[in-house]
Amino acid sequence: MLRYLARKLFIYLLTFIVAVTIDWAIPRFMPGNPVDALVSRIALMPDANAALTSYFIAAFNFDQPLWQQYLNFWWALFNGDLGRSIMLFPTPVTTLIGRALPYTLGLLLPSILLSWYVGNVIGALAARRKFLDNSVLPFGYLLTATPYMWLGILLAWVLGSTLGWFPLAFGYDQSLKAEWSWQFFGSLLYHWVLPFASLFMVALGGWAIGMRNMIIYELESDYANYLMALGAPQRLVRKYAFRNAMLPQITGLALQLGAVVGGALVTEIVFSYPGLGWLVLSGIQNQDYFVIQGVFLFIIVGVLLANLIVDIVYVIVDPRTRVGLQGDAA
């Protein structure tokens, strides 16, 4: 087990270094100069603009060669410093991410976990009941083929604009003050429904289809036929089929994390939801290098950690994996 974890940690560490390097490089190869955009908004006299430009270039270390900026980035990263925002100078990027992070996690965690659980339950039931199979399968294919952004726009149009049941934008009523109160919490929940529903419904279809197909495959496998030939109760056969069908679903959870995170960012943009997606869009529009790389750095770390946890859970759930690890050690 320790050798397995060490090997996985090495792979994830290498992936982290490559991904963070790309994360650092992409904003710096974007066209335009963020300092010029920042100074132009201040609209001072030409001489003052030139002095201010020189000040900001030195403040952000843009006067240094790229290799030195790259080394400075890693040094600052290991010291917990993600830099200061260009568009909201001198606000630290960690402060901006700290404000947006609860909104994104409030969308991601419930949508990922609930869609995975509910989708697996519905798929397992559909594999046994023809009525559900005839209705779940077509609906599931429709949902899983739907882009997050398109479904978000559709829900906003039908439930928000046409019926007026839910608000179309923002994380809470802008007339309220962000504080710990039942009124503010109710407003948060009210504005949360549509972004959550768009993420939940798209992911739900894929999990239901996957579990339905895996259950049918397991019930037709040799061990299931052998158990039935021995007179084993059908409930016992289905129990083993469900447990074996869950293993690919756990692996699929790790593979789908990146897609779900990307869908959450796009969904936040559709609903002007004040999470990491809205923050990174503002960073791109303002050429804010540090906000862009800070948000994507957090996403990289989050996805890698989630995948590592799924790998560990897979070893715990599947005894055959532990047998394979013992064979490798021998």
Image: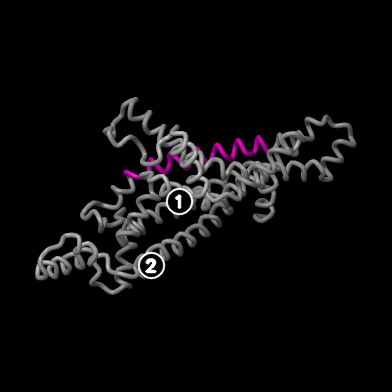
Q: Residue sitting at 64 percent across and 45 percent down?
A: 249
Q: Residue sitting at 38 percent across and 33 percent down?
A: 188
Q: Is residue 52 above or below residue 216?
A: below
- Horizontally, residue 311 falls left or right of residue 270, namely right
- The residue tagged 2 is 25
Q: Residue sitting at 73 percent across and 38 percent down?
A: 133
Taking the magenta stretch, the answer to whether it contains residue 24 is: no
* Label 1 neighbour load within 10 Å: few <14, some 14-19, many 20+: many
Taking the magenta stretch, the answer to whether it contains residue 111 is: yes
Query: Is residue 215 visible to us here?
Result: yes
| In-front residue for pair 10/32 | 32
Q: Position of residue 285 (x, y in %)?
A: 33, 59
Query: Where residue 143 is drawn, which disc sits there?
Result: none
In this rendering, the label closer to the viewer, 1 or 2 = 1
- Horizontally, residue 226 falls left or right of residue 38, namely right
- The residue tagged 1 is 266
| In-front residue for pair 107/324 | 107
Q: Secondary structure at mark 1?
A: helix
Task: Name the residue type under label 1.
Answer: Val
Tell me which numbered mark, 1 or 2, is placed earlier along the sequence: 2
Q: Position of residue 307 (x, y in %)?
A: 53, 50
Range of magenta residues: 99-123
Task: Name the residue type under label 2.
Answer: Ala
Mark 1–mark 2 distance (CA, rounded to whole Å): 22 Å
* Label 2 neighbour load within 10 Å: few <14, some 14-19, many 20+: some
